[in-house]
Amino acid sequence: MAVLGNPKNTIQVIQKYNFDFQKRFGQNFLIDEHVIEKIMKAADLTEEDCILEIGPGIGTMTQYLAEVVREVIAVEIDKNLIPILKDTLSGYSNIIIRNEDKLMTGELFEINEDILKVDINTLVNEHNQGKPIKVVANLPYYITTPIIMGLFEKHVPLESMIVMVQKEVAERMQVGPGTKDYGALSLAVQYYAEPEIVANVPQNCFIPRPNVGSAVIKLTRHKQPPVKTKDEAALFQIIRASFNQRRKTLINSLRNASDLSYEKEEIEMALKQMELPLTIRGEALNLEQFARLTDILVKEK
Ligand code: SAM
């Protein structure tokens, strides 16, 4: 039975262990059952699922997950949370715990590590025979982008991610051209997945209260990217360069990028071929146009 996820029980656990919140680890614990239920519903879990939870905290969502799925792998960086997790999760046998290098299945164990250093592909092979996992997490906001992009770029077998992120970041992931939030993150996320904001979450749903609003976003991995390109790495270089200097024209942004070496004339020719004005800014192009531009420029090389 899940017992956490409300203010009273969370405060009790924190006091019992005299736990000190670490700002540097982005620790804001969820204390609202309705929000957790929305996350669980959006995650659309089955008893076959293997879940990667990043940053379980005191195990609030971990309990809910362990009730319905086959296995939960929880990766937590803060050593001070490990004894707490061992307590709050003691009733579950489907939460895999690896304490440093020791691997023990069928017992409670915790991966006490930095998620950015974990070899997640190996984890998926070991725990889900390489089949796609689901990620469910209330993320530490200071590393939201590296976590999400790392999972995509390392081609971790992944069905979906249901993650709590800063509200502005969720909006950036979801928008298209013509909005101020549109940028390299929108394009990168949309290349790999279909984003859908499933809930906005106010500050009072956490202890301690974060300084920013939050949102739960579901990223459903595309089976195939929605656009084809000859050179994925070049596509992302061009996208990044185009948004580095938002107020500049696309031609100037690409010319100024230190990791690109396209001549002005080449870029002009490409834009003409695409029937786009030479004064266009990167923020006006959609993913398909960036892929087309990349293919023209790569061909020119
Ligand atoms: N899941 C809990 C909840 O919803 O109440 C806690 C969420 S809190 C926003 C983020 C969690 O991520 C914290 O427990 C924090 O210690 C952990 N964390 C921070 N950086 C991490 C990292 N690099 N690797 C793994 N966990 C990390």
Image: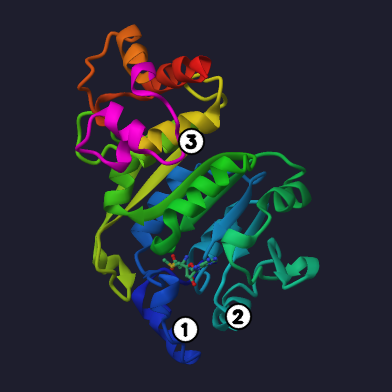
The picture places residue 227, in percent across and down from the top left corner, at: 47, 20
Type of residue at label 2?
A: Asp
Mark 1 or 3, nearer chain start: 1
Q: Which residues are magenta?
A: 242-266
Type of residue at label 1?
A: Val
Camera sees residue 173: yes
User: 184 or 163: nearer the eye?
Assistant: 184
User: 213 or 291: nearer the eye?
Assistant: 291
The picture places residue 159, in percent across and down from the top left corner, at: 57, 38
The numbered dot on residue 289 is none
Label 1 crowding class (10 Å Cα cut-off): few <14, some 14-19, many 20+?
some
Task: Point out the image quarter for the N terminus.
Answer: bottom right
Going 45% across and 14% down the picture, which residue do you hit?
A: 296
Type of residue at label 3?
A: Thr
Left or right: residue 192 versus residue 122 is left
Q: Check if mark 3's residue and mark 2's residue have beta carbons within 8 Å.
A: no
User: 36 or 216: nearer the eye?
Assistant: 216
Mark 1 or 2, nearer chain start: 1
Q: Taking 125 as reference, is 267 above or below it?
A: above
User: Which residue is disc 1 drawn over?
Assistant: 13
Going 36% across and 80% down the picture, which residue do you hit?
A: 8
Left or right: residue 162 versus residue 53 is left
Going 39% across and 17% down the picture, which residue do you hit?
A: 266
Task: Give the foreground label among 1 and 3.
Answer: 3
Q: Is residue 250 magenta?
A: yes
User: Which residue is disc 3 drawn over?
Assistant: 220
Q: CA distance from mark 1 to mark 3?
A: 34 Å
Secondary structure found at label 3? strand
